[in-house]
Amino acid sequence: MRARVWAATAAVCMLAGGAFGKDVEIGAVFPMSGTNAIYGDVFKSGADLAAEHINADHMLKEPLKILYEDSQALPQPAVVAMTKLVEVKQVPYVLSAFTGVSKAISTLAQRSQTVAVNGGGVGPDLAKLGDYFWNVIPLANLEVRAMVPYLAKHGMKKVALVYVDDPLGQSILDELNANLPKVDGKLVAELSVPTSTQNFSGIAAKVRASGADAVYIASYGAQQIQIAKQLRDNGVKAQLASYSGFSTPDALKLPQAEGLLYTTQAVNYKAGDKVTQRFLADYQKAHDGKKPSAYIVNYYNAVLLFGILAQKLEEAGKPITGANLLAERKATKSFDLVGGTVSFQDNGTLLAPIQVNKIVDGAGQPQETVDIN
Amino acid sequence: MEAYLLNLGVLVSIYAILAVTLNFIMGYAGIFSLAHAVFFGVGAYVGAQMAMHVSASLFVTIPAAMVVAALLSLALALPALRVRGEYFVAASLGLQMLAITVFSEWKGATGGIGGLVGIPAVRMFGEDIYRPAAFFPLAAAVAVLVLIVTRLLVHSSFGRSLTAIRDSESAAESFGKNIALIKTISVVVSAALAAVAGVLYANYLSFINVESFTLNTSVLVMAMVIIGGTGTALGPVVGAALLLILPGLLSYLWFLPQTEIGAIQQIIYGLGMAVLMIFRPGGLVGRSAGARKRRKRDALKAAAGQSEARKMEGAK
């Protein structure tokens, strides 16, 4: 009997663990398991570094703590995780990633007045998820507007598109159709692929036949790597191009992706501002001199943004709630984040310059920065 | 905390409906389907479209979803049920693959891969029902209703025909049972009731996309049935509760790093399934291996006794 009482007490203590303490808590719904867990690790490294800096600077009265929940990059586990963060932990701010997950949690965010911040998904439909859903990442439609003039300037006016037929792929198709004529360019092939397809030899043949100067790849995860690999293996010599989804470590290291052009949010690491230099120095110190990817910057910025807003609320004597964070963001015109000073559009999406990068020796090298209006 | 538990309660209720309806064909008719998520998805998409464009009342969305799922299952069951056992599993797998492609590509109806966002909450008696505290009683009531309907069917003459087919198709046929008709009706009933779960799911999450209706979901529902107890009344409900609450419970164990919980969960599932199949092949609610052996031994003894008696009678 006594053993049972002890066991029950231990169980209650276990469940109650972490419920005590005065930390300022925010949440993160990231893929921590499954095939997309690699992204969760990448996002987490950026968010953790920002929390470390906020705490080191004592920006907030109490230490900031990020509560991570596993979304498996799927809508239903994400809703369960979000409910826990909102209802049990009562966090005012949640980091989100992946389009399906972001859409799934957006309703809960709206209803509970909790700010959800995306720093990974770039589907343009993410700009329409309500006041409480923010994007600290320029969405894919803006990225195409930077890539097209760059390609044209380098004599690549005939473009073929290989895309997943989803809102992301569709928006890239629309943007290419709208922007190529402006530079006397032409979309010579539009080839849609189902998400599950892994064999692209047929697509490669069509790309070769189209005579394209450049091939734009609009996919994600393992599939985009397969597309780049198989296009090259099947004799496609045209310039490869893509969007920020290609800036994952495994995609950059792919030998066949050498020379591929991709766009990201412009991060001017050479900028002399304190925020960028500190981020870069500390990240490289912790990761053997490795350069951070755009995703790491975005989640660092997402947490830093919370720190800035929460600090202002504390100074004004207001509680840190989702509604107050939203009001404070709307009242603040610009923010000093990694990469420079940025501002938000009315729909809660970051407006930032876009950078065209080239993969050289398995790493992205910035080529040109384009201001998007 | 209360809302979190109620939220889990809603999901358990929805998946219990799926598990109970799969158990209806799997446990009683012996039809192993790997396409149950298809009818879940059909229900969700039809329910969502009706809620977005016609009415968010369950009295409109549920009947519409049930009719569409039933018709679809009818069209598919008629040719597919001509094959038996493992061949039907393969056929249902094909259907699952086909449905995923349709869900992903038919943008007008399903929103494509992007899915449908902003599905209105259930509207009943002039109120929007979306908070876990309000939705849980509704979902639980529907789950209980589905459970009652399936129990009534199982205990009817139709249910006895189903079990006869499960135990021996040839024997049932020799007794004049119309195998194809009975199997088709059971699949239609199961699909229509699974669609109810889809409607609730779409209304509750207010967002659906193809990721919720993949083969993984079909396998998960089948695991719920097997773990809980195939051919039992409450087994599927227990299986659904266990498989949905376990991940949530694990996430509360603060000494487990969040990054490892997914892997630990998979290990627990795998080990649990293996141990269960060894010691309780009938599932948690089903008979234990020992009870099965005893029952078999008793039956053999009884048979041996009868044959002994017949021999003695013959000797006389």
Image (cartoon, rainbow, N blue to C red):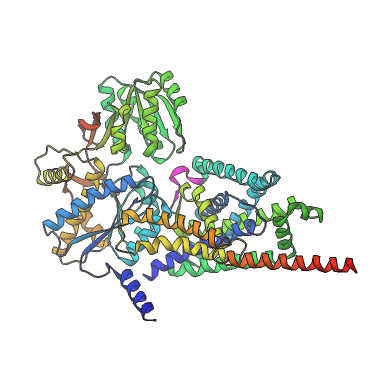
Q: Residue furthest front?
A: B315
Q: Position of residue B248 (x, y in %)?
A: 39, 62
Q: Start and end of the magenta stretch?
A: B110-117
Q: Is residue B236 left or right of residue B4?
A: right
**Quadrant that contains the N terminus of chain A:** bottom left
Q: Position of residue A188 (x, y in %)?
A: 40, 23
Q: At 65% across and 57% down in the image, what residue appears?
A: B189
Which residue is situated farthest in the right direction here? B316
Q: In the shown orientation, is residue A123 left or right of residue A198?
A: left
Asked if residue B92 can be seen in this view, the reply is yes
Quarter of the view holding residue A224: top left
The answer to which image quadrant residue B28 occupies is bottom right
Instruction: Out of A140 and A202, give the one closest to the viewer.
Output: A202
| Residue at x 39% of width, y 30% of height | A227
Residue A115 horizontal/vertical position (percent): 29, 57
* Most foreground residue, B250 or A73: B250
- Asked where in the image residue A86 lies, by quadrant, the reply is bottom left
User: Would you say A77 lies left or right of B233 here?
Assistant: left
Residue A179 vertical placement versus B147 (above, below)? above
Q: Nearer the viewer, residue A360 or B189?
A: A360
Count of numbered circles on the image: 0
Q: Any magenta on residue A222?
A: no
The residue shown at (30%, 21%) is: A156
Tell me the residue at 15%/46% (across/down). Answer: A279
Residue that protrudes farthest toward the bottom in the picture: A1
Q: Is B114 within the magenta?
A: yes
Compared with residue A112, is residue A194 higher up or lower down, i.e. above or below? Answer: above
